[in-house]
Amino acid sequence: MFFFNAKRMGNKLINKYEGFIFDLDGTIYLGNKLIPNAEKVIEKIKQLNKKIIFITNKTTGSIKDYCTFLKEKGLNVTESEIVNSTLITKKYLNEKHFGEKFFAIGEQIFIDEIESAGLTYSRKPDEINIVLITLDRTLNYKKLEIAAKALDNGARFYAANIDDTCPVEGGEILDAGSTISALEKRTHLKLEKHFGKPSKFMMDEIINKLNLLPEKCLLIGDRVETDIVMGNTFGIDTALVSTGVFNHFDGNPKFIPTYKIKSVNELLTRG
């Protein structure tokens, strides 16, 4: 397997691109701690009048929550520069399923956000139109069975994200992908759609916000099966950082980043 060596790029890496797409968890911060010098990297990019988008598959906070958190950590950001999978999910459901009933394996803030898109939450399998899966740190057997019975009854099978794990300080926790696998085995059904990385739904939102050609952008993230795959699928160069999840490489060309760097700080030191 071959990686471009960021050291060989000298000071060209940060100058090579007009738009920078940053994953959040494991890339800009881990747990409640900012990755060292992340705020300096963001400030330098903005001083160069380049465009920035922050993206995350995590649904345990609103766009406003993420913006507040990042500002408190010293980052110069606005809500319009943040995209999470909840936002993409809401847009699709509002357009395609307005007024329908849903059940979510997800936390209360995610449920509230989906309700704000014009859908109604239900725990009754016989009236549920849509089952939504995302990170849920309160997951239990009862929730799994409500979802499974609704799917058996013909509910649509969607996910806000498909990450197997979520990076936290000290390791990783189970995420939506593990729940999806369990439900697929329980129901013998396959997930129909997902709206986070590496989906076209997420990519379209990013490009629309940046208003740049994909080849003028660099996507920086910590996870090969979402961040790197999305970049490779849609023609965007990628930089894989080692500050988040542990990655398994299987030789799939979709999993090969353009650059492999230790952390976002290397964008600054190479610039």
Image: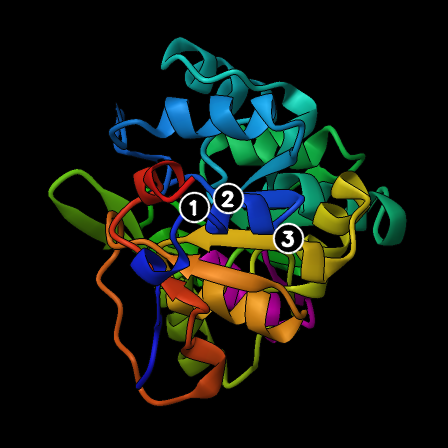
Pointer 3: what residue?
217
Decide if residue 126 is on the left or right side of residue 207. left
Picture layout, residue 144 above or below residue 44:
below
Pointer 1: what residue?
11
Q: Position of residue 154 (x, y in %)?
A: 69, 72
Answer with the quarter of the image where residue 215 lies: bottom right
SS for callout 2: helix
253 and 269: which is toward the camera: 269
The answer to whether the residues at label 2 and label 1 have Cβ atoms under 8 Å apart is yes
Answer with the quarter of the image where residue 20 lies: top right
Pointer 2: what residue?
14
Give the magenta part as a residue range.
146-160
SS for callout 1: loop
Seen as rendered, the residue at the extreme left is 170
Picture layout, residue 74 above or below residue 159:
above
Quarter of the N terminus within the rendering: bottom left
Residue sitting at x 41%, y 82%: 185
